Amino acid sequence: MPSTVIVGAQWGDEGKGKVTDLITSDYDFVVRFQGGNNAGHTVKHGERTLALHLMPSGIMDEVAIPVIGNGVVIDPGVLVEEMEMLETEGISCKNLKISCDAHVIMPYHKDFDGADEKRLGENKIGTTKRGIGPCYQDKAARKGIRIQDLLDEKIFRLKIEAALSQKNPILEKIYGLAPYTVDQICEEYLPYARILKPFMTESAQLLNTALREGKNILFEGAQGTLLDIDHGTYPYVTSSSCCAGGAAIGAGVGPTAINKVLGIQKAYITRVGGGPFPTEQRYIEDGGSPEESIIGNLFCTEGHEFGTTTGRKRRCGWFDAVIARYAAEVNGLTDVALTKLDVLSAFETIKVCTAYECEGKIYDYFPMQQSVLFHAKPIYEELPGWKGTDISTCRSFEELPENAQKYVEYIEEIAGVHISIIGVGQDRQQTIVRGWTSK
């Protein structure tokens, strides 16, 4: 019964989609357990690059059954559009399973998300304005609408009526936005119910039955550890549990069902949105020095660092071992997949942050106080690079340049987790498997 959780071990965008796609063939089910269409996984299909936002990356596999778990919040319009896109590409969605308990993103959730960001101004969180946060708020307040509610028009209308009695006054009087009617929302959402009904299931029952039958399950997270609602750089986080522990809750299985946790890390580090970022190499337009900007732009262009969901230019910086150690602890990582090692071929020397300094105090662990992290200065170890050497054709660790091998071994040692998979290019084949096994 080997079951694995894949988690982002930084701020998201680490390459989880590619790694999931790479190892899916070892599993019978691939389960997305949290987040919504604020996340994006980029996967290669033949000559095409596809962006998935709600669909588990395992949809690319013809055998594994893709499941959208109860911990996900679903914009049904986005999901239907994504299904249609995949079918057009010749990728069947017939095996898709959607948890009846997953919550639904409503139009007013998106309105609130955008209006709140505008109100916050310079202090904005940096959300994607897809309505994810407000949807999770309603879920926690026990006022949410679930996928199963779409199956009964009478119940759906009653719940929408109750919701609008609270939402419309806020939309009109506080934000100056147009209110909604029950008929307006039903007209948009009930057709989605007819499309999605064949895919709806009691997902917890489905997965626990599979576990009893000895099936293998891969739990696929979105975002990353430092965007976790509890363990991330709060309040600059998402609204769900991105860490490995969230897989059990977001899929409806017990924690004893999980025996491996694979953390995905870039060979450098990126984030989108606001919040602290100690090793960031800021762009000139963001107040960075010319030297910082050159390094940041090099990361961005060589790594194609633009958000899958938003298209936003990502903030980039050197690898942070403090974060790597923290992610290993809070997720219980058993293995690491290190992606985009090839991007570092652009640098003569490479820096790794080993600790922070703030007001004379050294932190080799993730600081408890938000104010410390905002003012932390990175303490770097500088390593020789392998500038100009193309490593995209390497398929074994021994084929890598000596300095690339030393870099991987250094990160492995300082973070305390074995690096089992190394990405040396965008394609699935551009990967070095170094001891990874699903068992």
Image: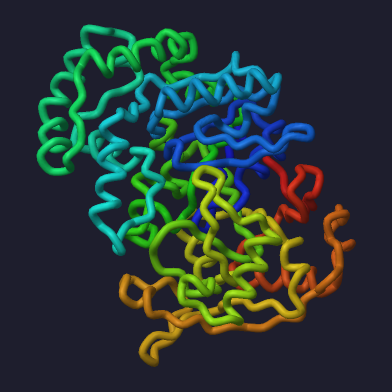
Give the image location of residue 129, x and y in percent: 37, 43
State whether residue 241 is above or below residue 347. Answer: above
State whether residue 284 is above or below residue 237. Answer: below
Image coloring type: rainbow
Relative to 351, 106 lies left or right: left
Q: Residue at x 76, y 42 (%)?
A: 428
Quarter where residue 397 is shown: bottom right
Q: Residue at x 54, y 30 (%)?
A: 55
Q: How many numbered tags mark residues here?
A: 0
Give the image location of residue 11, x and y in percent: 49, 57
Relative to 419, 260 lies left or right: left
Q: Residue furthest bottom?
A: 360
Q: Residue at x 34, y 46 (%)?
A: 239
Quarter where residue 112 is shown: top left
Give the image location of residue 154, x and y in percent: 21, 7
Quarter where residue 162 is shown: top left
Q: Quadrant of the N terminus?
A: top right
State whether residue 215 is above or below residue 404. Answer: above
Q: Residue at x 41, y 69 (%)?
A: 276
Q: Quadrant of the C terminus?
A: top right
State whether residue 98 is above or below residue 118. Answer: above
Give the image location of residue 101, x and y in percent: 35, 23
Front position in the image: 222 or 214: 222
